[in-house]
Amino acid sequence: MKTSPSAVTGWRRVFPHPVLSLQLAVTWLVLSHSLALVHWLSALLIAWGLPRLLAPVLGDASRLHWPTVVRLVLVVLWDIVVSNVTVARLTLGSMRTPQPAWLRVPLATDHPRVNALFASIITTTPGTVSMAIDEQRREILVHALNCDDPQAMVRDMKDRYETPLLRAFLIERAPAAQAARQGGQA
């Protein structure tokens, strides 16, 4: 259910995306290296103006399950650190020869934001790169630098990133995706 602009009250009317507004304001103050009044006012203007300009593109921020978002961010940050160490060990030669692989990761939804974030998270994690999102086949083509078990790697990506993204955006799996997932686990 979408919230109409007239139904939004209080701070949400002034700051439609409060978390983004806070991030923008803090980033501006950090980048300006000053806490002078002019920088506080600039931060406030940016925190107010940018999210309002981008509101039609961003959609409704209140429809997120924030505890899941926080957990997902922590999981992704942890995976980035672990993957960096693994890739460094692999490239510096202390591990065995890499086994690169191309993976087809099936998508559980048609939601463009969830699929784009899923592909971005895969690319952000060192050792994997999302090459393309095939909307007709409902899959992401991923290149892995080192992959012993392609099915396990695909299952891990879906469990660690896609499932929390679906929960965060309050989206149910598509029936076809549920059947494919259950068939893949058997």
Image (spheres, helix red, strand yellow):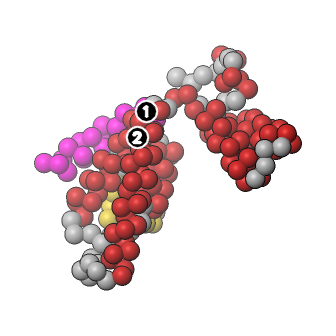
Tell me if I can see residue 49 in this picture. no
Disc on res. 58: none
**How far apart, in angstroms, are the residues tagged by discs 1 and 2?**
6 Å
Q: Secondary structure at mark 2?
A: helix
- Disc 1 residue crowd, few under 14, some 14–19, many 20+, Cα 10 Å: few
What predominant SS class does the magenta segment belong to? helix
For this rendering, which residue is in front, 29 or 121?
29
Residue sitting at x 78%, y 44%: 35
| Residue at numbered disc 1 | 67
Residue sitting at x 51%, y 29%: 63
Please report the bounds of the magenta region as a residue range. 168-186
Q: Is residue 41 above or below residue 131?
A: above
* Image quadrant where residue 134 sits: bottom left
Tags 1 and 2 touching, CB below 8 Å? yes
Q: Please, what is the three-letter code of the amino acid marked with disc 2?
A: Arg
| Residue at numbered disc 2 | 71
- Disc 2 residue crowd, few under 14, some 14–19, many 20+, Cα 10 Å: few
* Image quadrant where residue 95 sits: bottom left
Q: In the current view of this chain or complex, which residue is farthest to the left?
A: 186
